[in-house]
Amino acid sequence: MKRILITGASSGIGLEAARLLACSDHRLILCCRTNARIEQTRRILIDAGADASRVDGVVMDLADLGSVERGCQQLLAQGLALDALVLNAGLQRAGDPTPARSAQGIELTFAVNQLAHQLMAMRLLPLLQQAPQPRLVITASDVHDPCTGGGRVGQPASLGELQGLRSGAGFGMVDGSPRFDGDKAYKDSKLCNVLMGRELARQLDEAMPVIAWSPGLVIPRGDGGFFRFNRQRNPLGMALFSLLARDLLRLTESVDHAGGLLADLSTAAEFSTAGFSYISNRLVRPGLHRFAAVETSAEGADPLKAAELWKCCTQLIEACLSG
């Protein structure tokens, strides 16, 4: 039995992974933005067969670094070891012409997908290191790589020289581009996730598994989940895209299967090799995916870029928390 902290467990693949883990008698800590969200998710898991005593929660609003810091300090005060830290939450605002902002004024995609998760890794690493066989799992995406199918659509991921990030909280794009592109902002955040994992593994001297992974294109049915912003902004376009990609061309992965992969990455012995790895659930042909370790993009493999990104993110986090 493992003690696992997971973000993004209230919907989508995170909720399915949480259900599988909780029903396998692992102890879960749900990170949600409110107590009400924690209780709602707990009830879903308990109704699915989880032991109520094994499902806890801590409030962390990933759009507020202050909330993340308070949640981390609460866990550190408890002092209980973590067997797995699963940084799964993510949002996408493709089509948004202007950047939404976090509580600290940071572009929201970057704030949630990257900065909040780096803060969690920074603070909670001592709890991971207390466990006998810890691991860290980061949900990234193949769109970080311009050579993949999704990475070729629209503007490719690229962080440039981090000019935007270096300028402080008010940037729109990490690379300093003057025009905001919500789709590229998402791709860039996933490239940041890959680089974060690579730098963490280096800092840990390859002492534990640090796994970045891509679940493939997952389009849930219903109103919630990862594409909720797209559904709200362009319901007809999203409906047509879903019909084409999911139902006609069969290019997507199911929530159930992707959630199962995330649960396996969090606990299965086959993913216990120390050091950094990138594992992709890549489409082979319509209706068939292959889950295997693959190379990241060239930029995602740059150790100097990884170290510099970590440094710049740390500086921004410290400035926001001290301000």
Image (cartoon, rainbow, N blue to C red):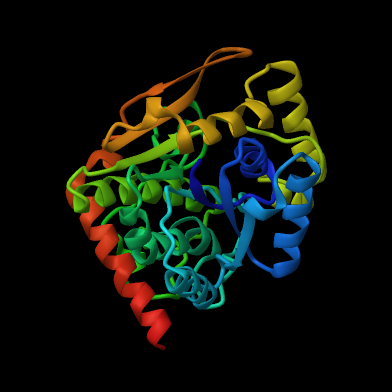
Residue 122 in the figure: left or right of residue 247: left
Q: Closest to the observer: 203 or 167?
A: 203
Count of marks overlaid on the render? 0
Residue at the far bottom: name it: 323
Which image quadrant for residue 287? top right
In the displayed structure, 203 sits above or below 103; it is above
Q: Closest to the observer: 236 or 319?
A: 319
Residue 66 in the figure: left or right of residue 278: right
The residue depicted at 37 percent of the width and 60 percent of the height is 127
The residue depicted at 47 percent of the width and 35 percent of the height is 267
Q: Is residue 147 visible?
A: no
Q: Closest to the observer: 51 or 159?
A: 51
Q: Quadrant of the C terminus?
A: bottom left
Q: Closest to the observer: 123 or 295?
A: 123
In the displayed structure, 88 sits above or below 270; it is below
The residue depicted at 37 percent of the width and 39 percent of the height is 211
Which image quadrant for residue 236? top right
Q: Where does the image place residue 57, in percent across and percent down from the top left?
A: 62, 61
In the displayed structure, 67 sits above or below 138; it is below
Q: Where does the image place residue 270, in percent across and percent down from the top left?
A: 39, 25
Q: Where does the image place residue 4, in percent across and percent down from the top left?
A: 50, 49
In the displayed structure, 37 sits above or below 93; it is below
Q: Where does the image place residue 221, in percent across and percent down from the top left?
A: 79, 35
Q: Is residue 154 visible?
A: yes
